[in-house]
Structures are given as C-alpha cells and as structure tokens.
Amino acid sequence: MPSSDGAESPALLEARGLRRSFGGLRVLRGVDLTVRAGEAVVVAGPNGAGKTTLLRLLAGLMRPEAGEVRVLGRPLRGDGEEARRPIGFVSHQSLLYDDLTLAQNLAFTARLYGLPRPADVARAALESAGLAARADDAPRRLSRGLIQRAAIARALLHQPRVLLLDEPFTALDATAAERLREALAGRLAAGLGMVVVTHRLGEVWGLATRVAVLSEGRWACDEPRRGPLETFLPRYLGLVGA
C-alpha cells in the first residue's frame, strides 16, 4: 500500500516459501505472502486447498516444513511468543473458556497482554461488540453467533497490527455482520493488516484490497480487488476448475 509520498509502507506480515505436508499429502507448496498496513487480503479456494493451514502457519500455531513467516520484521520460530503478540487470530475454535464468563474471558486475555485495567478493557470490548448484556454469561450458555462475536472481540482486544480471520462471519446475523464489517473497515483505515479466509466472498468483498486464490497448495492468483464481485466470480470458477 503506498504511503503519502508514494513509497510502499513496510510489511506487517511476510511469508516466504511456506511448505507443509500431512503424511504424504502436500498441502502447501511454496507459498509467499506480504501484507502491508491498510491491506485486507481475502483468501479463497476450494476445500482442501490449504487455506486454514496457511492461516495457522501465519499465526505461529503450526511450523512450516520449509519457509519463514515474519511479523513486523521478526521471525516466527520456536515458541515465537513475543513475535506473535502483534497478531489477532479468529479460528473455528473460539479460544474462550467455558467455565469463565465473557467478561472474565476477556479480562484474562487483557492480563495476558499486560493491558492496564483489564476488567474495564473487557467490558468496553463487549460493549463495542454489542455483548454488554451477556457479559456475565459463560460461553456454554450462548448461541454460536454470540460466541463468534465474543471470539472476535477477544482477537481485537489488544489492538493487533495483524488480524487473521478464518470464516469470521460464520453464524453472524445481518446486524452483527454489518457491525463487524464496520469495525474491520475502521481498523484497516487505522493501519491494520488483515488476512481473511472465506468460502463466501460476498461477505468481505467490500473490505478486500487484494484477492488471492489458493488451489492445490499454490496461489492461482494474488491480485488487487477490482470491480464488483460478479465480474470476478467467472474468473474464480475458472481458476479452481469448478
């Protein structure tokens, strides 16, 4: 993304030559990716293309067999705890504890990141997510949509520089989905970098600055988002052989 003087902004997230196999199955075959401030890279592709594996490698939750991931210039290797601090991650698992209330879950996360006044930070995050009325409920008492909203609030709690999202609109109703899009647009304008894995491009097309299609462990395309989704869909179907 160019800066005001025309130069590219520094990369928030870089991946080079990522390879990963499971047994004899090659899932990623040398994937490169660069995400800069204000960029939202939407990653699409068929089931089994390696999208979730890629996201877990970028989050530092899985090690590549080859290649490297850097966050703000620091390599993710070994335990990589300090290098992972700028990352917010939303996966298929909520990462919430069922025996804690939502307020306690988010306060615990705030303490992990060393945020001051963790209880107040947690309550403010739940208010922003429209969950203030459920702050004292445990996740096991909530619907899938409410849990998803709480998981997103948790991922955004520490103001990450890089946000990794795996199907973030799962189970969200129309109001919650629009609230999330507005929140993400605001974070992008403030310099967040984002990677979103999705099967439903229409939910994130307006946020995307780039669209990348993963097929058989490689990029079939990685290009700026241009025009309406309807003009891209025939190209997408051709790329994935649908």
Image (tube, rainbow, N blue to C red):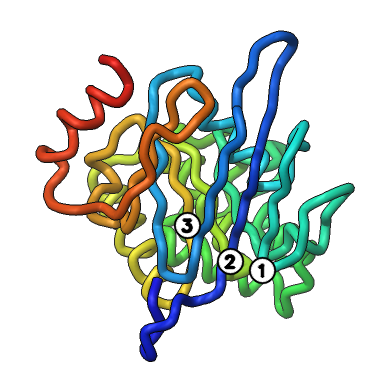
Judging depth in this view, the residue of 146 and 17 nearest the camera is 17
Secondary structure under the numbered disc 3 in the rendered image: strand
- Circle 2 sits on which residue? 12
- Judged by depth in the image, the label closer to the viewer, 3 or 2, is 2
Image x and y of residue 62, in percent: 74, 36
Location of residue 88 with respect to 22 vertically, above or below = below
Q: Residue at x 28, y 40 (%)?
A: 173
State yes or no: discs 2 and 1 in contact (Cβ < 8 Å).
yes
Lower position in the chain sequence, tag 3 or tag 2: 2
Lower position in the chain sequence, tag 3 or tag 1: 1
Judging depth in this view, the residue of 145 and 207 nearest the camera is 207
Looking at numbered disc 3 in the image, what kind of residue is underneath it? Answer: Met
Looking at numbered disc 1 in the image, what kind of residue is underneath it? Answer: Leu
Decide if residue 48 is on the left or right side of residue 61: left
Location of residue 152 with respect to 138 vertically, above or below = below
Question: Rounded to the nearest whole Å, what is the CA distance between mark 3 and mark 2?
Answer: 9 Å
Image x and y of residue 49, in percent: 48, 23
